[in-house]
Amino acid sequence: MSANERLSEGVATPAPSAQYLDAKRTIQEMAMSSGRHLLDAPVMRLCVMAVYAGMLIAAGALFSVLLSAGVETQGPRRLLEGLGFTAGFCFVILSQAELFTEINVVMPVTLLHYSKWSLVGKATRFWALAFVGNLVGAMVIGYLVATVQHYPPEIASRLAEIVSTKMAYREIGGVTGWLQVVLSGMLANWLVGLAAFFATMGRTILDKFIPLFLAVSLFVAAGFQHSPANMAYFSLAAGAGMGPTWSAALGWSIVPAAIGNLLGGLLFVVLPLWIAFGSKHSAMIEGDNSGAKS
């Protein structure tokens, strides 16, 4: 029966299939496919893909510097910086590399879904491997770029400005400065976690890229602290012989940002979405609603 015949006879036309996964199916996909696959993956694969993610993020950081250098107006400069960094994050998603901040959403969802304490040890190991691997990968690209390429002074100036901004919390000092990095990291992974969630929803590359661009550009423009991004910018700066020492970068930027990223992914992304769409409580509510309708 054609659509016109259905309308003439008062029969409803079936709705077309959804162009993206709904929130509930996205939670299940992250837990049962992405998360479970990571927990069962060989250590060598995890290490390689974590290093590869760091390399890709460093490429995105480099692109953000190249696009935004020499742009004086704040709005366009931040937009271009966000666009450049989105490229690196998009490469990570499409290549299925293992980025620390993306894992901060996938792992908690997986642990909540399976509710097995025996998986916590595997998850903790994976978090550590992702963090170290991302740092190693970023350092590889940072030093390689400095070895093979020499950019104009405005490029170096823009990179130095970004690194200096990320180290501004050290000027505040003490517990206050350190906690501000943690809180900024929470906001960063709220947006990056949503980017990973929306990318899982999408069924085409374009479906994945648009929400990635919006969420990642927002955190970059806002200046929130994202630990793999900070690894990348500090690696590019270190390769060029500028920026703080690695101990200062780790202590005042990368490590507190990573703690905030972990907390932000859990508190601002995983828990709200899990309570609404993934928990047994949400399933009971759906069951009650369906029973009431019938």
Image: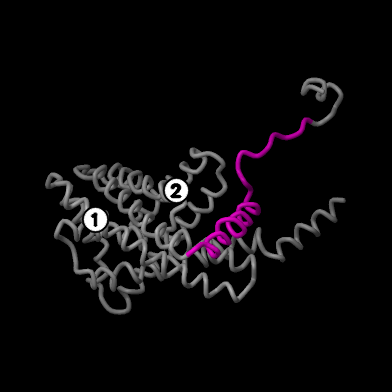
**CA gap, disc 2 to disc 1?**
20 Å
Q: Tell me the residue at 21%/50% (across/down).
A: 145
**Crowdedness of circle 1 by 10 Å Cα count: few (<14), some, many (20+)?**
many
Q: Tell me the residue at 84%/21% (across/down).
A: 8
Residue 268 % position (x, y): 51, 63
Question: Position of 220 compared to 279: left or right?
Answer: left
Mark 2 residue element:
helix
Is residue 35 located in the magenta-colored stretch of the structure? yes
Q: Nearer the viewer, residue 281 or 232?
A: 232
Q: Which residue is mark 1?
A: 142
Q: Which residue is mark 2?
A: 95
Q: Main secondary structure of the magenta part?
A: helix
Q: Magenta part of the protein: which range?
A: 13-42
Mark 1 residue element:
helix
Q: Tell me the residue at 61%/52% (across/down).
A: 26
**Crowdedness of circle 2 by 10 Å Cα count: few (<14), some, many (20+)?**
few
Residue 283 % position (x, y): 73, 61
Is residue 244 located in the magenta-colored stretch of the structure? no
Compared with residue 2, is residue 254 higher up or lower down, i.e. above or below?
below
